[in-house]
Image (tube, rainbow, N blue to C red):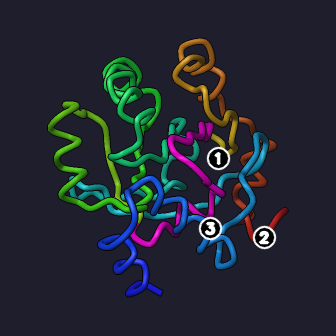
Amino acid sequence: MNQVLTFLKQTFFSRPILAIVIGFACVGQSLSAPLAVGELAPDFSLQQLDGEGFNLSDYRGKRAVYLIFWNTWCGPCMKKASHLVDIQSEYGEQAKLLAVNTSWSDSLAEIAQFQSRFSTNYAIAFDDNAEVTHRFGVMGTPTSFLVDINGVIRQVDGITDTLSANITEWNRVNSKVESLVNTSCSKERTC
């Protein structure tokens, strides 16, 4: 399948069209239903581009996590970049911001150009083979999730508009949720 996609990319398709084709091709493989508010976020690990590892469960009990799935060629993602720079500057101590590149028709070189062009100051990870992207049920970019201090998805999309008003609540430990989190819940195994 990878050879076919490479051929199609080089021969016929523009990036957005190729991403749509890849998205439909992957639907039958491992794409989960989109995650919803109130669900426990599935744990995952990715390597950030700065070399540091990221493990979502490391933030449980410490601070909220703002995940945004994006691509370098995505127009709305480009518009959001300056807002993410501001959020990282203002709320970086209260919420971990991780921009997860879906790897849909993107490369590390293109991400480096994006970082330079938009002067990003937030953590970026490359989701090679889009495994995390699929676990979260992402079907388009940008898609964002606010995972609270308890590991629960509290908001999907629109987070840049509500972060200021909700950050204190999203960083409040809930002992009932904490006991559920400690039972190793995941998208595949509910509690």
Which mark identifies residue 24? 3
The residue at the point 44 percent across, 57 percent down is 102
Q: Confirm whether residue 92 shows in the render.
A: no
Q: Is residue 80 left or right of residue 147?
A: left
Residue at disc 2, secondary structure: loop
> Residue 47 at x, y = what percent?
33, 62
The residue at the point 65 percent across, 28 percent down is 172
Between the residue at mark 1 and the residue at mark 3, the CA separation in whole angstroms equals 29 Å
Q: Which residue is mark 1?
A: 151
**Disc with the residue nearer the chain's start (1 vs 2):** 1
Magenta-colored span:
128-148
For label 1, the crowd category at 10 Å Cα-Cα, with few meaning under 14, some 14 to 19 and many 20 or more, is many
**What amino acid is found at the position of numbered circle 3 in the picture?**
Phe
For label 2, the crowd category at 10 Å Cα-Cα, with few meaning under 14, some 14 to 19 and many 20 or more, is few
Inspect the magenta stretch and tell me whether residue 133 lies in it. Answer: yes
The residue closer to the viewer here, 121 or 94, is: 121
* Pair 2/3: label in front: 3
> Residue 153 at x, y = what percent?
68, 42
The residue closer to the viewer here, 144 or 50, is: 144
